[in-house]
Amino acid sequence: MNRIIMIGAAIIVLVLYAVSWADTGERSRHGHKSSKSPGHDIQLGPRPFFLVQDMDQGPLKEKLESCEFGPFKKTDFSIGHRGAAMQFPEHTLQSYMAAAKMGAGIIECDVTFTQDKELVCRHSQCDLHTTTNILETELADKCSVPFQPAVYNAEGNLVTPASAQCCTSDITLAEFKSLKGKMDASNPRATTVSEYMKGTADWRTDLYATRGTLLTHRESIALFKELGVKMTPELKSPSVLMPFDGFSQEDYAQKMIDEYKEARVPASKVYAQSFNIGDVLYWIANEPDFGKQAVYLDGRYDDPAFDHRNPATWSPTMEQLVADQVQIIAPPMWMLLEIEDGEIKPSRYAKAAKDSGLDIITWTFERDGPLTNGGGFYFQTLNGQNPNPIDPDAVINNDGDMYQALHVLAQDVGILGIFSDWPATVSYYANCMNLK
């Protein structure tokens, strides 16, 4: 009798396992790996679900919970910021592929140039000492500023932090391609190169930083075409004096567009960006097909005379930008949000941009780290850090709150899309809300 009971129990377990496996397969087909793009399926991983579970109870949480099993597809609302830079070395093959895998419909290559005036993907012309392994190679001798170890006094207190500066303009394209990408970080207390190259924030990881493959701008175009995504190159401000060996700012802006034309990429698939309004106006005047959706990155918050809450300080005004045929403006997300009566609302800046007829893209989601203490730069109008808030009470106090901010940006501000260091988080929301 006992043997019969054991056999019966085993059969039941096997049946339950088979049902569970079939259900998992069905979820896989209709959930995390549902919608195919060229060469890959969409995989969002566990983070979106972690964030949804961390949300305060309410209609938005209930809606997002209802989408757990998809289906999920690529979306232009989700823009890969330097790829998937929260955990992958930025502007590397691996980071870009991860972003596409997470459903980003648009991916960014920040564009700068080498000593031989070739375009490459780097966030800054002079960030190689923190984003690559250059300091541990023979190319370290070519850096603008060689590595300097930290200096301590007799009591062991830090007097001068460790430093270095290595630029793409210090080396040739061939030399650039010999480097490997790493997580963007450095250790200011380092006394050796090995120590200096560490420093990755504890909420990021070095797990995927073992072989970051650097790309030229042309290589990024070829990759993005293969992945079936749109492209948003940012023309980075040069760290060297322009013209550089006869290479003018206009030459630089034109060369970036020329590489898309050479690759036969339709202008409709390219969102050229710059913090320099002159670059945007150049594209509008000289490459009107690309200029139609050129993006003016609004970095005026660094100007002490600029107040995003006071239109009298905005130069150019929203109306002037429209008159100059600028169609898309892209401020950091905090400039678009405000707290009013304890709730997140569109800011005066956001309303003025929309009222003038400008479309809006914003940045950057998933870049502040854990939000249990309110986050940092990107949530500053919602966490009490920004000066002179309309309402001083902070509303960001857990990771799930980021979805509430995203919801206001999408539904009330009406943004076209948002850059994210972890595109899966945005892709999940966009698919759940049927955003394209």
Image: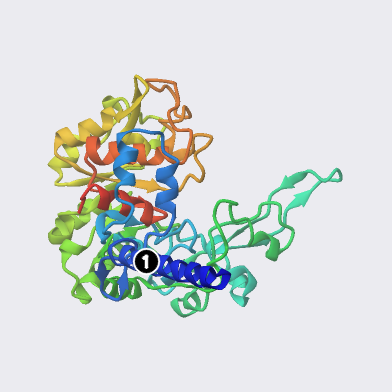
- Image quadrant in which you'd find residue 225: bottom left
**Residue at point 45%, 41% (across, down):** 54
Quadrant into which the N terminus falls:
bottom right
**Left or right: 186 as drawn, with respect to 304:** right
Is 175 drawn above or below residue 82 in the view shown? below
Q: Position of residue 102 (x, y in %)?
A: 36, 61
Q: Position of residue 387 (x, y in %)?
A: 45, 25
Q: Nearer the viewer, residue 332 or 152?
A: 332
**Residue at point 50%, 73% (across, down):** 7
**Left or right: 387 as drawn, with respect to 101:** right
Disc 1: which residue: 19
How many numbered discs?
Answer: 1
Quadrant into which the C terminus falls:
bottom left
Where disc 1 sits, the SS reads: helix
- Image quadrant in which you'd find residue 302: top left
Is 228 drawn above or below residue 312 in the view shown? below
Q: Nearer the viewer, residue 102 or 414?
A: 102
**Residue at point 28%, 63% (across, down):** 30
Residue placed farthest to the front in the image?
1
